Image: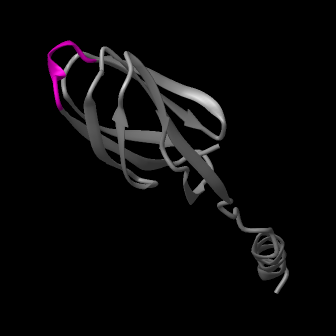
Amino acid sequence: MKKILPLFLTFLFFSCAEDDVDTMKLQSVYTEIEITNCENSSFTGFSSGGTFSFSCSGNNFTYTTNTFQTSAIENNSFFYQLSFSSSGNPSNIEITTRVFHNNSLYETRNYTVPYVGEMYSIIAD
């Protein structure tokens, strides 16, 4: 019995310890799309926040996508998708995308093509 008691007390102590709990946190992501040389061009696209379309009548134009929100486990990845294309005169169009995660700049990318398609793997914070 004396030999079993220390083992029982050790088991009892560790079985009462709190389990590690993963914390789910709300994440938000949106994209700011800046376009130059886009006169008389139209754009349609999709982000994880939904579909969108807009027309550019001047030389420079900025569009902000809807905000995508998801719950994710802290320090784990979640995905955000962005894709869009243009119609009109796409030969000179320059595109800069700025992806914001929880209102902080996550990444900036530049394109000179009429189609943009990206999948982002973002770490939840």
Instruction: Give the side of residue 102 with respect to residue 85, left or right.
Output: right
Tell me where residue 118 sits by quadrant: top left
Return the residue nearer the eye: 36 or 19.
36
Query: Residue at the spot x=34%, y=37% of the render?
Result: 55
State the image coordinates of residue 31 (x, y, percent, origin top left).
48, 36
- Figure quadrant of the N terminus: bottom right
Query: Residue at the spot x=52%, y=48% of the render?
Result: 76
Tell me where residue 119 sits by quadrant: top left
Query: Residue at the spot x=65%, y=61% of the render?
Result: 22
Q: What are the residue bounds of the magenta stretch?
A: 88-93
Residue placed farthest to the bottom in the image? 1
Depicted 112 relative to depicted 56: above or below: above
State the image coordinates of residue 85 (x, y, percent, origin top left).
22, 37
State the image coordinates of residue 14 (x, y, percent, origin top left).
77, 69
Return the residue nearer the eye: 42 or 69.
42
Depicted 11 relative to depicted 69: above or below: below
Query: Residue at the spot x=51%, y=50% of the render?
Result: 66
